[in-house]
């Protein structure tokens, strides 16, 4: 898989872009879709946005007028839809992260902000791949976050 990683940091989070890209790559490679995506060009867009912007996006797309940590928007309705793709160029989707919310969540959960960023970024990528909330999903994102969180800052 050749990963094309697009990153926008509207909130000046200061995270190392190369490590964020590694988290995205690890989330895809360790997923159940690695063999399907092998040899393909996969594009993923990630952006840190403000709490106000996250609330606006969440309200307009999910009818929830609240701030959240991560939202994922993909071109595929589910994993079966993704597996139907025959092209070699795949735009997997976009992951929006709210830095303010992530910092607060880290404090509440008693983890570092770096761990929380890795955890929710991996979570967003796994949703783009069609994962639903499950023990498998949460274990995978925790493992990836633990591996890379020390490198993020």
Image (cartoon, rainbow, N blue to C red):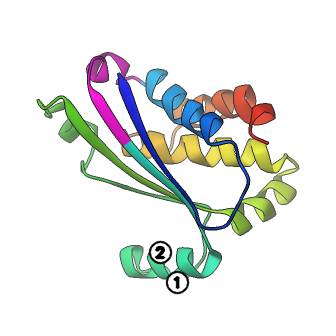
Q: Is residue 9 left or right of residue 46?
A: right
Q: At which x and y percent is residue 150?
A: 81, 33
Q: At which x and y percent is residue 32?
A: 39, 23
For the residue labelled by badge 2, is the local secondary structure a helix, a strand or a loop?
Answer: helix
Q: Is residue 109 above or below residue 147?
A: below
Residue bearing mark 1: 65
> Residue 103 occupies which quadrant of the picture?
bottom right
Q: Is residue 88 above or below residue 111?
A: above
Q: Is residue 35 left or right of residue 70?
A: left
**CB-based contact (under 8 Å), mark 1 and mark 2:** yes
> Residue 38 occupies which quadrant of the picture?
top left
Give the number of marks: 2
For the residue labelled by badge 1, is the local secondary structure a helix, a strand or a loop?
Answer: loop
Mark sitting on residue 58: 2
Mark sitting on residue 142: none
Of the two numbered discs 1 and 2 on the same chain, state the one appearing first in sequence.
Answer: 2
Q: Is residue 80 left or right of residue 64?
A: left
Q: Is residue 39 magenta?
A: yes
The stretch in magenta equals 32-43
Q: Is residue 143 above or below residue 15?
A: above
Q: At which x and y percent is residue 137?
A: 53, 35
The residue drawn where x is 52% and y is 38% is 134
- Which class describes the residues within 10 Å of circle 2: few (<14), some (14-19), or many (20+)? some
Q: At which x and y percent is residue 50?
A: 62, 74
The residue drawn where x is 62% and y is 30% is 139
> Residue 1 occupies which quadrant of the picture?
top left
Q: Is residue 95 magenta?
A: no
The residue drawn where x is 24% and y is 48% is 76
In what quadrant of the picture does the C terminus appear? top right
């Amino acid at each position: 898989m050749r990963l094309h990683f697009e990153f926008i940091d509207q909130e000046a989070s200061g995270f190392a872009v190369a490590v964020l890209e590694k988290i995205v790559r690890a989330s895809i490679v360790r997923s159940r879709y690695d063999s399907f995506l092998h040899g393909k060009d996969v594009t993923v867009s990630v952006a840190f946005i403000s709490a106000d912007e996250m609330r606006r996006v969440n309200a307009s797309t999910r009818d929830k007028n609240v701030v959240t940590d991560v939202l994922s928007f993909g071109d595929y309705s589910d994993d079966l839809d993704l597996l139907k793709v025959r092209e070699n160029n795949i735009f997997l989707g976009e992951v929006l992260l709210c830095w303010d919310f992530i910092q607060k969540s880290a404090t509440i959960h008693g983890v570092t902000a770096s761990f929380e960023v890795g955890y929710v970024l991996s979570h967003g990528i796994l949703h783009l791949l069609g994962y639903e909330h499950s023990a498998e999903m949460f274990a995978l994102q925790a493992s990836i976050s633990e591996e890379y969180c020390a490198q993020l800052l």
